[in-house]
Image (cartoon, rainbow, N blue to C red):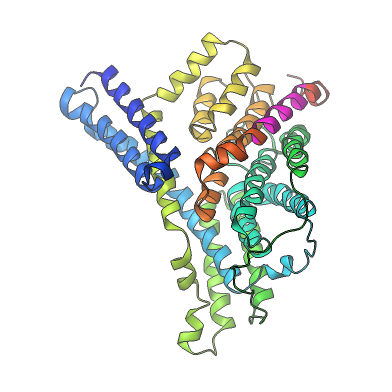
């Protein structure tokens, strides 16, 4: 199979798969099935190039797949661990410690509280874990799902904005930090205001459309009033376990999934101790084994399919060639980085940033260069423009069954306005914080 035909076939397969994911509801085909088929077919076409045309060595292709599978598995294990911890806290009604203290009935006030909590929590944890936690909280605060979706949409924007200015808040910022492209202190100093603006502008706009009080779902069951044993302890153990992950990574330099597994193991032991005197039938309701059965595995498999498909594009150097094309055809770095941010809503920001890191050497663009700071902002916040453009969006999509088209109509334009407002602010204040080279 000629190389050009193979590359074309992979691109067409990816586009068709993407369209099927976007139009999940009209087609009545689950997005997870579309993502898995897209990922596997893309790699199958690549593998057939070795069988039919001898373009590549089959062993080399398998090695490339294994190379990509390692970071993909790390993400999936981390996701499952974080979801299990959050589910365990939720089963013990641990989040009532927060929800019972949020007494406002005003829809606007609640939106502001949720967005600011998400923004700052995302910088300490990461945008994915924060989204899981906040969506779980919103389920307790806003029982009407249609009303809750607007809050979840803003959580995605706030989580991505909050993660962009912290070295541990977003995977792309972490990549740049570990790679030596940015320093922790400088990235926080230069990107805090643009990231805050990225959240505040959509928040101001949406506030004008939210009137009155929160309306509970009349069909929803009355919330439980009985306090479950160990709820406070499980809340602090769960949140502490999540906060422990970045510290564990910094100290040991082991990947985050090791930290989340350590936290999950510790919380598992705590839950067993809390309910040691209960009957097995009653004890099982609050066990991590039961929480594992409740996590959204279709969303995990959807994430797997998407990442497999994108890794095939990376292995075929399609993403790198795209980055080179932008560099030669556009030239202006500010415009290129802005475009990369927009593209990160369509194509995962991780390989885009990885390709860009390979394009621009540190010898020419040293640590804390404008290019790297701007890219951290753009790649971190640009994904909010589509529901599948970020890990936070994918998690929210799975947890709340958000329709791709609904998000496109209701949230995407708000995210786009916030994204470009943050860019304008960054370019305006950059001379103030610029590091001399």
Which residue corresponds to the image point at 26% horizontal and 35% vertical from the top-left?
44
The answer to if 421 sits in the magenta stretch is yes
Which residue corresponds to the image point at 77% horizontal and 44% vertical from the top-left?
207
**Overall secondary structure of the magenta stretch?**
helix
* Residue sitting at the far front: 218
Quick check: 330 left or right of 12? right
Decide: is 310 above or below 244.
above
- Comparing 129 with 184, the one in front is 129
Residue 254 appears anywhere in the view: no
- Comparing 59 with 410, the one in front is 410
Quick check: 6 left or right of 420? left
Quick check: 96 left or right of 136? right
Q: How many marks?
A: 0
* Residue sitting at the far left: 52
Q: Which corner quadrant holds the N terminus?
A: top left
The answer to which image quadrant residue 362 occupies is top right
The answer to which image quadrant residue 103 occupies is bottom right
Q: Looking at the picture, how far across and down is residue 146, in whole percent? A: 60, 53
The residue stretch that appears in magenta:
415-427
Decide: is 437 above or below 217.
above
The answer to if 6 sits in the magenta stretch is no
Q: Looking at the picture, how far across and down is residue 360, in whole percent? A: 56, 20
Q: Looking at the picture, how far across and down is residue 14, in whole percent? A: 37, 31
Quick check: 116 left or right of 45? right
Which residue corresponds to the image point at 50% horizontal and 41% vertical from the top-left?
404
Q: Which corner quadrant holds the C terminus?
A: top right
Q: Looking at the picture, how far across and down is residue 191, in whole percent? A: 73, 33
- Comparing 143 with 333, the one in front is 143
Decide: is 142 above or below 396.
below
């Amino acid at each position: 199979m000629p190389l050009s035909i193979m590359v074309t076939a992979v691109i067409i397969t990816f586009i068709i798969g993407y369209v099927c994911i976007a139009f999940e509801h009209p087609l009545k085909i689950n997005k997870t099935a579309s993502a898995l088929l897209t990922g596997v077919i893309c790699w199958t076409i690549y593998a057939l190039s070795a069988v039919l045309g001898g373009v590549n060595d089959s062993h080399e292709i398998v090695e490339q797949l294994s190379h990509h599978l390692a970071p993909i598995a790390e993400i999936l294990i981390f996701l499952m661990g974080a979801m299990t911890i959050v589910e365990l806290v939720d089963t013990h009604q641990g989040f009532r410690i927060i929800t019972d203290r949020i007494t406002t009935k005003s829809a606007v006030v609640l939106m502001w509280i949720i967005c600011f909590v998400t923004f700052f929590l995302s910088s300490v944890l990461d945008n994915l874990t924060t989204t899981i936690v906040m969506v779980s909280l919103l389920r307790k605060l806003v029982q009407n799902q249609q009303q809750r979706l607007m809050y979840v949409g803003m959580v995605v924007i706030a989580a991505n904005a909050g993660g962009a200015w912290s070295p541990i808040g977003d995977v792309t910022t972490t990549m740049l930090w570990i790679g030596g492209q940015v320093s922790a202190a400088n990235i926080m100093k230069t990107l805090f205001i643009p990231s805050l603006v990225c959240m505040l502008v959509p928040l101001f706009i949406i506030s004008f459309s939210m009137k009155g009080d929160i309306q509970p779902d009349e069909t929803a069951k009355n919330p439980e009033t009985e306090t479950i044993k160990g709820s406070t302890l499980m809340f602090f153990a769960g949140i502490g376990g999540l906060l422990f992950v970045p510290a564990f990574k910094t100290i040991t330099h082991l990947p985050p999934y090791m930290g989340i597994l350590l936290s999950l193991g510790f919380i598992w032991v705590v839950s067993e101790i809390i309910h040691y005197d209960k009957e097995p039938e009653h004890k099982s309701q609050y066990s991590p084994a039961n929480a594992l059965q409740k996590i959204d595995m279709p969303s995990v498999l959807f994430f797997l399919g998407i990442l497999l498909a994108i890794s095939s594009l990376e292995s075929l150097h399609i993403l790198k060639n795209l980055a080179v094309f932008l560099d030669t055809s556009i030239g202006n770095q500010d415009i290129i980085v802005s475009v990369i941010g927009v593209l990160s809503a369509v194509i995962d920001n991780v390989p885009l940033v990885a390709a860009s890191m390979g394009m621009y050497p540190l010898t020419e663009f040293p640590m804390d260069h404008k290019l790297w700071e701007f890219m951290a902002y753009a790649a971190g916040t640009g994904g909010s423009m589509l529901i599948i453009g970020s890990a936070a969006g994918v998690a929210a999509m799975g947890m709340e069954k958000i329709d791709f088209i609904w998000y496109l109509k209701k949230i995407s334009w708000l995210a786009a306005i916030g994204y470009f407002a943050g860019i304008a602010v960054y370019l305006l204040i950059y001379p103030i914080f610029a590091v001399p080279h």
